[in-house]
Image (spheres, grey):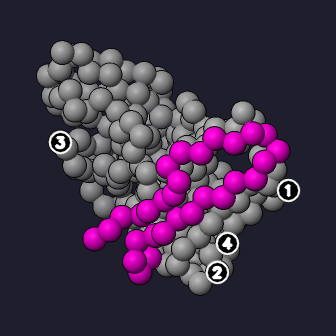
């Protein structure tokens, strides 16, 4: 079965600092991988997705993620954090080689002034 | 383009009562999903519809949960009777097909007391 593991339930950064949210996947087939963001009392919004094209994927709001097969990782980064980035971030893998997301437990990003 | 609409936004019920949630997907989207998101966890897929047919309901607790999408558009998710552990946010999502991006509604927050 496909799954993802997000390392760290909370990540705290200062405004302007690098954001790094970690995600490792387990999949028996080439995976589709996603990062979603959830703001308080909101639904999930797709940040970016990997579908076996370029390994470096650029998403919305300045976020990007790199697919590393050798490390089975799909970490999310942003060069400079903004206060508005504070939210819950979910890594997900496409179940059964599809776009149907199976989610990790989420990482809460806290941004300090 | 209107997004996925869900109602109600919040619901509080006593255990053993019944409750129903409603979802109106994005117009033209054939695929509809219901997810359960327990506090502190990632969303878990309960059921997936393709038009008015069930594609996957393997994680739906069928002794108390039911869902339907009679005309292939709107969907309802019902819990009868509710248990304390059913307290969660219930998210509806839709996509135009099985291998396209899923768009999420804002969710219904259920509290069972």
Badge 2 density bin: few <14, some 14–19, many ≥20, Cα 10 Å: few
User: Secondary structure under badge 4?
Assistant: strand
Cα distance between the residues tagged 4 and 2: 6 Å
**How far is disc 1 from disc 2 in space, using C-alphas?**
20 Å
| A67 in relation to B20, above or below | above
Side (left or right) of B16 relative to B88: right
Q: Which residues are magenta?
A: B1-29
Residue A28 visible (yes or no)? no
Local packing at callout 3 (Cα closer than 10 Å; few below 14, some 14-19, many 20+) is few
**Element on which disc 3 rests:** helix
Q: Chain of mark 1?
A: B
Using the rendered image of the protein, determine whether residue B103 is visible from the camera's viewpoint: yes
Identified at 46% across, 23% down, the residue is A8
Look at mark 3 in the image and give the residue it sits on. A62
Which residue bears the numbered disc 1?
Answer: B63
The quarter of the picture where the N terminus of chain B appears is: bottom left
**Mark 3 chain:** A
Q: Position of residue B32 (x, y in %)?
A: 53, 69
Q: Which type of secondary structure does the marked residue at label 2 adopt?
A: loop
Q: Is residue B28 magenta?
A: yes
Label 2 marks a residue whose chain is: B
- Same chain shared by disc 4 and disc 2: yes
Q: Which residue is mark 2?
A: B70
Q: Are marks 4 and 2 in contact (CB under 8 Å)?
A: yes
């Amino acid at each position: 079965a496909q799954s993802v593991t997000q390392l760290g339930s909370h990540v705290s950064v200062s405004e302007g600092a690098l954001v790094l949210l970690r995600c490792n996947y387990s999949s028996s087939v080439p995976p589709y991988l996603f990062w979603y963001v959830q703001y308080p009392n909101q639904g999930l919004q797709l940040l970016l997705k990997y579908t076996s094209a370029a390994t470096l994927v650029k998403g919305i709001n300045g976020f990007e993620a790199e697919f590393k097969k050798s490390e089975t990782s799909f970490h999310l980064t942003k060069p400079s954090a903004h206060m508005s980035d504070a939210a819950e971030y979910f890594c997900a893998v496409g179940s059964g080689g599809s776009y149907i997301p199976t989610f990790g437990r989420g990482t809460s990003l806290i941004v300090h002034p | 383009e209107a997004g996925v609409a869900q109602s109600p936004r919040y619901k509080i019920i006593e255990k053993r009562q019944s409750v129903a949630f409603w979802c109106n997907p994005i117009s033209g989207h054939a695929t509809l999903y219901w997810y359960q998101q327990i506090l502190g966890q990632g969303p878990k897929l309960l059921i997936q519809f393709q038009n008015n047919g069930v594609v996957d309901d393997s994680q739906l607790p069928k002794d108390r949960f039911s869902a339907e999408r009679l005309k292939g558009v709107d969907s309802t998710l019902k819990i009868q009777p509710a248990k304390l552990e059913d307290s969660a946010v219930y998210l509806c999502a839709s996509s135009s097909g099985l291998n396209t991006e899923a768009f999420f509604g804002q969710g219904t927050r259920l509290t069972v007391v």
